Amino acid sequence: MRKVHLITFGCQMNKLDSELAAETLADAGHIVVDDESLADTVVFNTCSVRDHAEQRVLSRLASLKPRRLADPDFRLGIMGCFAERYGEELLRKLPHLDFALGTRQFLRLPEVLERLDREASAKPEKAGHFGPAGAESPGIHQSHPRARHQGIQGFVSVMRGCDNRCSYCIVPDVRGGEVSRPAEEIAAEVRALALAGAREVTLLGQNIDAYGKHDNSSLAALLRLIDTTAGPDTGLVRLRFVTSHPRDISRELVETVRDLDRVAAHFHMPAQSGSTPILAAMRRGYTREEYDDKLAMIREVLPHAGIVSDFIVGFPGETEADYLATRDLVEKAHFTTSYIFKYSPRPGTPSALTMRDDVPDSEKKRRNNDLLAVQSTVSSTRGATLIGRRFSVLAEGESNRNARRWTGRTEQNMICVFDAPPEGDTWRGRLVEVEVESATPLTLFCRVVGNDAQEQPED
Ligand code: 5AD
Ligand code: SF4
């Protein structure tokens, strides 16, 4: 039995994979510990999306080197995207690293730890190596029991991998091609999560609109199935999905979101750039005009939808005019928020192989900061228009800053802060009706005007 501490970098998919890895470890009799100092095994779930993410893992691995070398019983491993890509090389270069498991292999964690223990007793100075190459873990695409899930938010993977070849992106290399999970399995997992206490479930896929495209299904059909399988009797209040590719998001999907009450009017639809020539160089498969059309379609069907975007600034060849086109998109699109990144060439990707990283870092920084400022102004203006509006907020718990205030999220995924419930009462996991009193770019400050508990009959 090992005491394992998992440290997660990267996206929601990685966080979910860590949760599934933890469940698998617990099923095999290991203990998953929150406190790193109590652990005899540390596993990093890694990200490769930008160079910075890789460097952070390397420095954390280096900081654990003395402990690993001093204690023959201590184990150090990596899983996830960086492990998939550089696992073999890191195992060769880092004598203190015991194993690397690729993105579809983390369910083998218990098996690997047991094997290391067996081999360690024979050869204590170096436990063993497990490269990322090899078969997928059995069960990786199947439904997971999830009965141990804690918290009101849950995540379910509906597909793994990505078939797009955006020229800057490492994901197809590290997460492989698209594999959609069977709809019934997903629906069963959502139901299990809800019964375990999750009130909001987010469906995850790198390119979720492509769900089911190989077997004549669709994300819209999946949402309808889940809506029936995980009915209100399960306690599920809200369903979300990320991430949408602007080319693939369909009117049928948006209408389905409109028609199903519990599916949140929230879309994460990364534009990446507002300039058509840059979008072409990125191989995104749409023009600026087509992106604008998708935005207009969503706003027409669901005027109150929250839309979130990602942008990369300083892509090879991005001129000032290209950047200004991106700026123009952010000014006009009224995104709830935008995640903005400086281009980071990923070795082996088409853009790194064929294009020179020719925008100087100082210029990338300037564009990054400028775009952040534009989005912040847009968010403030948008926030001001929401004053007096009412929202249903899924209450999460006490605010970190002030125990007398609570936080939660609207269906558009905006954070709300509102007064705490009366002593002894809890609103955790319930819908609370609030009215917006003031707003900052990222937060709505509200007063409570009702909560779903009041509507329930007394027992
Ligand atoms: N450089 C910078 N940002 C990137 N992203 C993906 N690849 C890169 C890269 N090479 C950003 C995209 C994506 C988000 C998850 O990370 O905006 O949507
Ligand atoms: Fe990072 Fe992309 Fe892997 Fe997520 S899928 S962990 S963002 S490289």
Image: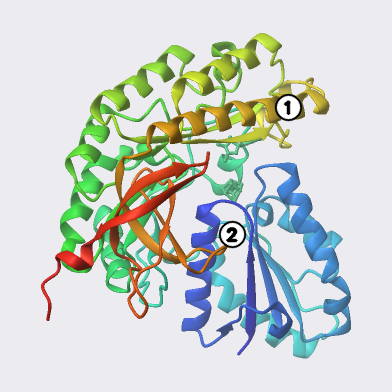
Answer above or below: position of 285 versus 419: above
Question: In this orientation, does residue 158 appear?
Answer: no
Q: Residue at x 68, y 53 (%)?
A: 82
User: Looking at the figure, which quarter contains the C terminus?
Assistant: bottom left
Residue 105 in percent (x, y) is at 55, 63
Q: Is mark 2 within 8 Å of ligand 2?
A: no
User: Looking at the figure, which quarter contains the N terminus?
Assistant: bottom right
Answer above or below: position of 68 versus 394: below
- Mark 2 secondary-structure assignment: loop
Q: Relative to 302, is 152 on the left or the right?
A: right
First of labels 1, 2 by sequence position: 2
Q: Relative to 227, is 276 on the left or the right?
A: right
Query: What is the spatial separation of the Cα atoms under label 1 and label 2, in whole angstroms?
Result: 26 Å
Disc number for residue 134: 2
Mark 1 vs mark 2: in front: 1
For disc 2, the neighbor class at 10 Å (few under 14, some 14 to 19, many from 20) is: few
Disc number for residue 353: 1
Q: Which one is nearer the viewer's eye here, 369 or 138?
A: 369
- Mark 1 secondary-structure assignment: helix
Q: Which one is nearer the viewer's eye here, 85 or 23?
A: 23
Q: Residue at x 22, y 68 (%)?
A: 453
Question: In this orientation, does residue 430 appear?
Answer: yes
Answer above or below: position of 248 versus 118: above
Which amino acid, mark 2? Gly
Image quarter of residue 424: bottom left
Q: Which one is nearer the viewer's eye here, 144 or 230?
A: 230
Q: Is mark 1 within 8 Å of ligand 1?
A: no
Residue 225 in percent (x, y) is at 19, 52
Disc number for residue 108: none
